[in-house]
Amino acid sequence: MSLADNKKQMLHLAEKLGMPASEFGNTLDLLRLNEIHIVDMLPEMLLMIRSIIAEEKFIYKRKPIDAVKKGLLFSFHNIFSHSTDDHQHQDDEKLFHIQPHIRITPFNLESEVVFLKGCTVTQITILIDLDFLKFFIGKDQELFGYLFNDEKTLLIEEFMSPEMADLVNEIAGIRESGILSQAYYKLKALELLYLLFNNLSKRQQIKHQNLRSDEIAALYRVRDAVSSSLKRPLTHDELVKISGMNVLKLRKLFTQIFGKGIYEYSQYIRMQEAAILIKDKHLSVSETGYQLGFTNLSYFGRLFEQHFGMKPKKWSAQQRSKA
């Protein structure tokens, strides 16, 4: 299918979801829609699979969706950088490798999506009716009551596990058609949701509170700042200045959205970056530790082992044997 046909599919879907083409302006011209496949199983769910490369960095503001009265939007993002402009790449990323992640929002929430120049985004989006989702979860839905509270402005972001990333790539890589094709995609979408809810069940249990749009924007500023400052953890004063919140409120709302405390989130990102430096950049363990600001390599080794289940030297040797 041509890029023009892919664009038409995208605009047709947007119209169906209550977002007329006029709202996109020229933003679609900045995206190269390499692949798009839509599986319409409404009113229960809709599945969209697409692969996108941004020609320029830009921010798209998604309007509320009114195709389903009560539902949730699950966006699974597997992101790969193909930038050939090292200076531009460093300006945009600032050593921040975007991790594969899932964003959960209600249909009635406006949200922002940032597209970085030269990044390929393999995305699977699942729109699902709340009653159908409750039926799928069954008796365990009480664990996830915060997802079903219509009175609260909800936004959840979760890191994608390797199992989820593999499944996203599997679904994106197969174009199923013909008899039982909808059944195939429905089962795969539910498998993704099963893996996601298994992860969400391990989150710290906190009381979720309503979020304002300015608070969401502030929390993403903090997230980006933390992710860009891997060599040196930000101080409380710096975090307060970035967010405009006191430390207690910031910690609570950050954990509410991202499922980890700020320090825990920072360490997770540092370890994912360490894995990239060892595997893809072929740095030694000591070079990796020092580049990420660790003066104590023994501590770096222990932290790495906590995240990956083995010491960095053994993990590095294992990765080389797989290559």
Image: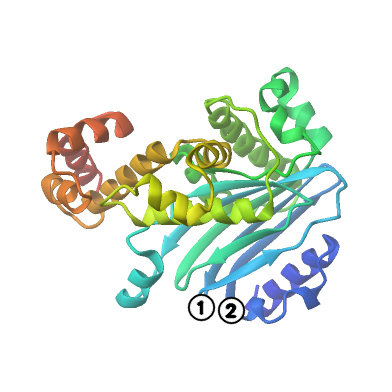
Percent across and percent down for residue 225 are 41, 56
Vertical position of residue 194 compared to residue 77: above or below: above
The answer to whether residue 78 of the structure is visible from this angle is: no
Vertical position of residue 76 compared to residue 5: above or below: above
Percent across and percent down for residue 9 are 74, 69
Instruction: Identify which amino acid the numbered label 1 is placed on.
Output: Glu
Percent across and percent down for residue 206 are 59, 27
Relative to 272, is 168 on the left or the right?
right
Give the class, few, some or many, for how many residues have Cα within 10 Å of label 2's Cα (few <14, many ≥20).
some
The local secondary structure at tag 1 comes to loop
Relative to 16, is 174 on the left or the right?
left
CB contact under 8 Å: marks 1 and 2: yes
Residue ranking furthest to the top: 139
Task: State the image quarter where residue 185 is shown.
Answer: top right
Instruction: Identify which amino acid the numbered label 2 is placed on.
Output: Leu
Q: Earlier in the sequence, mark 1 or mark 2?
A: 2
Numbered circles on residues, count: 2
Residue corresponding to mark 2: 30
Could you say which disc has been placed on residue 56 in the image? 1
- Residue at image point 74% right, 41% down: 183
Percent across and percent down for residue 91 are 36, 72
The local secondary structure at tag 2 comes to helix
